[in-house]
Image (cartoon, rainbow, N blue to C red):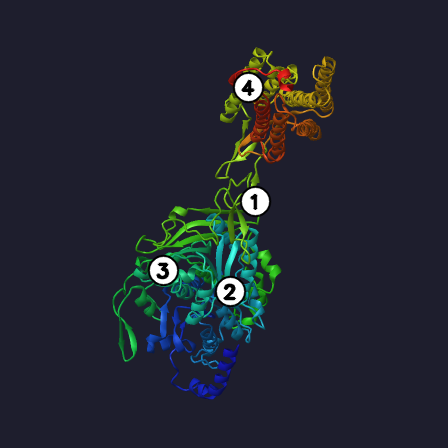
């Protein structure tokens, strides 16, 4: 806006001088390509790109005098102008349109810059360059002007419309459709060909999903259409699990400081989507100066990328890979033949063809008196022979729009003339060129529309949109530099189809295979994603699955818990069936315990045999030898009962193991308690030789054994009657195993059994401790005291060890406690007697003991 105001002020200052030159006899040469007709259509096209300060006042005549002002020659854009010439020629040949009246054209080059679009628009209206506002130096041209076609970008179309809307001249833009264009022009917006932007968005999304590119940068035009694109596609990308690495509005590519700063702060991904960016090619080239090569560009402006005449050895210096979406267009009938016939000598009034021809045919330029002259090379050549990077014979989407725009204007003009013909004659004076604004009602009825009339545009959109996908490839590698690699058909959000032949895509010299564009590397099997704090959801960290869980797919948000009868493998990517395990006889631990139990049982049997063999010796007879026999038998059973704990648990074994253990041990401890009682009574209350009293003591000791055992039997009976032990499985204790075990049922009853054994042992310990100072010949008080200390120590240690162990270890702890406590009783009580019997000669009588 500021630039436009400054230009207007310059016009005011110079208007008087320009008016004089306008009416002088020496009228300057026309700055454009003019062909007369009954009606004239203006055309504003972009053939060249200026550099430096020259771009603000550059036109074609200036280019002739100042060749250094031209930065780039966009030769392929010349096809847009030829499409307009071809369309007008065909219309003029058709006698059924325009009532046998002819169309003419007035074509200008606006140099791709918005400021120049203002200048050329005013030159088109005034017929003079530099332009003279509100004056027509060529009435025969400007009075016939009915409409204007231009420009090729949103920014250029906007500036053209600022000038033409003042005079209400219809403008048809062949730029990509922009719904926001009407909001920029105060009076009226240009007519546009409606396109389905949703189809473009969805096509880009599907392409990203096809290659699993989830970390994507956005580069858009610095205008409202760019903002709309960012908003819409960001929402769609989020819905499909894609992330925006950055969204940047393109600035002037010559602002190198900005781009350098931008690339330093932006986490550049491997893939960038560029949408309708003015100066797109030059921005891409500038960015690549500061980034690693190999970027994949997804564009919606193939005319920008392919229009530049690349030097073959620089193609891959600037680009990694370009995949471009283009609206599918059919070839214009006869257009290729027309292009083949184009030659400078056949177009003497085309002031553009000479310069374009010299570039397309790569002819040397000569300058004479500051005027560039075309050498004779290629004068009779054909455009069909030129390589793709210089010229494309296929109809470009923009050329198709220009051709259609001409026909739309001609149709509107024909309808306007028809209304006048109905009420009058065919007199030429009646069918003179109408005022431009009278065409608006007829243009609005056609296929064209304005961005402000959104409802009308929607109704005009076709039901299905087809987009072609092209891959720009190096001319060094393939004969065609733009290769169609796929297409995308969009009917609705639920009906769309992407077909892609990725084998045709050449990823350039920087990638041997399809590039990867992710913020974080995929989490492999066995790992889950955890969002990275402060970053988009596409950025994450990978952590191993917890115990018992797996991740059988990559990038899983949550791990899957294995069923109870399965367990994860070491990689945690698969659940495997658990192995049923129990303390079996084949296990090393089970085999050792069985061997120890049998060995101790055999040793106990041997001790019992010694006692029976020397049953008449005083040491065996002392303290009731029957109790000694009972103790040894119960110890033998204790050793054997440990064998029930080994093997696969069943209902019978689960019940028997605890019941037998409790009862047999209660018999053994009761026998020891009775022996302790005999020691005390024998040395404290019984006189020597008193047979009656000894008989009574013996009966009482037997009663102690029976009573102590019966109480344990009752406890076990209550246990069996309420909540008995039963076979169970433990799926959690051991990794990869299902432990078969016996559930104790009532834990309280189990600890009651142990508690009762502890009570008997404690009582025996107490009584034996009181009898420790009695004469030690035949006195078992000390050995009983020590044996009870060992017994209690073992079972006190058993409780925490039992509670802290799991699976087979729990069973092994109980077996070890049984064997250790039983071996302690055997060793502390019986082995000293065996030592006396076997190793010490001579016997001892009680009679001798009391002397």
Callout 1: SS: loop
- Residue occupied by mark 2: 409
Callout 4: SS: helix
**Residue 657: % across, % down:** 63, 22
- Inter-mark Cα distance, 2 to 3: 23 Å
- Residue occupied by mark 4: 836
Callout 2: SS: helix
Indicate which label's residue lies in the foreground, 1 or 2. 1
**Residue 264: % across, % down:** 44, 65
Q: Earlier in the sequence, mark 3 or mark 1?
A: 3
Q: Which mark is residue 339?
A: 3
- Inter-mark Cα distance, 1 to 2: 61 Å
Indicate which label's residue lies in the foreground, 1 or 4. 4
- Residue occupied by mark 1: 558
Q: Quadrant of residue 294?
A: bottom left
Indicate which label's residue lies in the foreground, 2 or 3. 3
Q: Nearer the viewer, residue 170 or 258?
A: 258
Q: Nearer the viewer, residue 102 or 544?
A: 544
Q: Give the vertical position of 364 relative to 615 (above or below).
A: below
Kindly identify the residue that appears in the image at 32 percent across and 61 percent down. 314
How packed mark 2 is, by other alpha carbons closer than 10 Å (few <14, some 14-19, many 20 or more), is: many
Q: Earlier in the sequence, mark 1 or mark 2?
A: 2
Indicate which label's residue lies in the foreground, 3 or 4. 4
User: Looking at the image, do the residues carrying marks 1 and 4 touch, with CB atoms under 8 Å apart?
Assistant: no
- Inter-mark Cα distance, 1 to 4: 72 Å
Q: Earlier in the sequence, mark 2 or mark 4?
A: 2
- Inter-mark Cα distance, 3 to 4: 129 Å
Q: Which mark is residue 402?
A: none
């Amino acid at each position: 806006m500021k630039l436009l105001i400054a230009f207007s002020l310059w016009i005011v200052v110079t208007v008087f001088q320009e008016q004089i030159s306008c009416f002088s006899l020496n009228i300057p040469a026309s700055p454009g390509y003019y062909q007369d007709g009954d009606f004239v259509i203006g055309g504003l096209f972009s053939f060249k790109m200026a550099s430096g300060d020259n771009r603000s006042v550059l036109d074609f005549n200036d280019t002739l005098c100042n060749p250094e002002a031209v930065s780039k020659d966009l030769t392929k854009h010349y096809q847009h102008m030829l499409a307009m010439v071809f369309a007008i020629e065909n219309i003029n040949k058709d006698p059924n349109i325009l009532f046998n009246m002819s169309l003419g054209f007035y074509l200008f080059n606006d140099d791709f810059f918005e400021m120049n679009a203002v200048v050329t628009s005013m030159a088109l209206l005034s017929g003079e360059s530099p332009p003279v506002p509100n004056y027509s130096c060529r009435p025969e041209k400007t009075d016939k002007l009915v409409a204007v076609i231009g420009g090729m970008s949103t920014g250029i179309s906007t500036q053209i419309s600022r000038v033409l809307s003042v005079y209400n001249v219809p403008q048809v833009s062949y730029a990509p459709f922009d719904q926001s264009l009407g909001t920029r022009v105060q009076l009226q917006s240009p007519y546009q060909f409606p396109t389905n932007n949703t189809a473009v968005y969805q096509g880009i999304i599907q392409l990203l999903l096809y290659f699993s590119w989830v970390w994507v940068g956005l580069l858009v035009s610095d205008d409202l259409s760019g903002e709309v694109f960012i908003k819409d596609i960001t929402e769609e990308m989020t819905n499909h699990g894609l992330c925006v690495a950055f969204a940047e509005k393109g600035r002037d590519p010559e602002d190198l400081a900005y781009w350098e700063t931008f690339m330093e702060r932006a986490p550049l991904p491997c893939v960038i989507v560029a949408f309708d960016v003015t100066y797109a090619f030059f921005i891409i080239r500038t960015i690549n100066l500061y980034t690693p090569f190999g970027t994949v560009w997804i564009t919606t402006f193939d005319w920008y990328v392919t229009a530049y005449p690349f030097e073959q050895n620089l193609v891959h210096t600037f680009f990694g890979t370009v995949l471009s979406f283009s609206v599918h267009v059919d070839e214009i009938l006869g257009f290729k033949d027309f292009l083949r016939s184009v030659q400078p000598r056949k177009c003497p009034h085309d002031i553009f063809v000479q310069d374009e021809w010299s570039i397309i045919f790569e002819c040397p330029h000569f300058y004479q008196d500051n005027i560039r002259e075309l050498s004779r090379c290629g004068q009779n050549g054909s455009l069909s022979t030129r390589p793709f990077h210089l010229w494309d014979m296929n109809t470009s989407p923009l050329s198709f729009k220009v051709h259609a725009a001409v026909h739309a204007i001609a149709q509107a003009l024909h309808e306007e003339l028809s209304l006048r013909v109905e009420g009058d004659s065919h007199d030429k004076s009646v069918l003179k060129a109408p005022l431009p604004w009278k065409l608006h009602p007829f243009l609005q009825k056609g296929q064209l529309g304005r961005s402000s009339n959104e409802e009308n545009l929607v109704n005009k959109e076709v039901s299905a949109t087809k987009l072609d996908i092209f891959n720009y490839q190096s001319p060094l590698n393939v004969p065609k530099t733009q290769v169609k690699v796929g297409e995308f058909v969009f009917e609705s959000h639920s009906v769309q189809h992407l077909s892609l032949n990725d084998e045709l895509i050449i990823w350039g010299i920087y990638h041997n295979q399809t590039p990867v564009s992710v913020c974080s590397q995929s989490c492999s099997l066995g790992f889950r994603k955890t969002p990275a704090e402060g970053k988009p959801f596409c950025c994450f960290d990978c952590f191993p699955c917890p115990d018992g869980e797996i991740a059988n797919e990559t990038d899983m948000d949550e791990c899957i818990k294995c069923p109870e009868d399965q367990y994860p493998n070491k990689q945690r990517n698969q659940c495997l069936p658990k192995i049923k395990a129990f303390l079996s006889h084949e296990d090393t631990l089970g085999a050792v315990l069985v061997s120890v139990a049998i060995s101790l049982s055999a040793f106990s049997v041997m001790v019992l045999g010694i006692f029976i063999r020397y049953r008449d010796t005083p040491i065996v007879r002392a303290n009731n030898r029957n109790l000694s026999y009972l103790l040894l038998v119960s110890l033998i059973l204790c050793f054997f009962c440990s064998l029930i704990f080994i093997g696969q648990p069943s209902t019978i074994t689960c019940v028997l193991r605890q019941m037998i253990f409790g009862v047999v041990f209660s018999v053994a401890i009761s026998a020891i308690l009775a022996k302790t009682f005999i020691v005390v009574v024998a040395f404290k209350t019984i006189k020597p030789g008193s047979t009656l009293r000894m008989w009574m003591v013996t009966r009482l000791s037997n009663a102690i054994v029976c009573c102590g055992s019966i109480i344990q039997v009752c406890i076990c009976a209550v246990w069996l009657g309420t909540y008995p032990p039963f076979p169970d499985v433990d799926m959690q204790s051991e990794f990869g195993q299902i432990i078969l075990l016996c559930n104790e049922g009532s834990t309280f009853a189990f600890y009651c059994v142990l508690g009762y054994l502890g009570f008997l042992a404690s009582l025996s310990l107490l009584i034996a401790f009181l009898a420790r100072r009695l004469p030690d010949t035949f006195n078992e008080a000390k050995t009983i005291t020590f044996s009870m200390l060992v017994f209690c120590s073992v079972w006190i240690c058993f409780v925490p060890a039992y509670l802290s162990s799991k699976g087979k270890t729990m069973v092994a702890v109980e077996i070890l406690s049984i064997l250790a406590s039983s071996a302690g009783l055997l060793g502390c009580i019986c082995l000293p007697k065996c030592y006396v019997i076997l190793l010490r000669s001579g016997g001892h009588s009680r009679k001798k003991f009391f002397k």
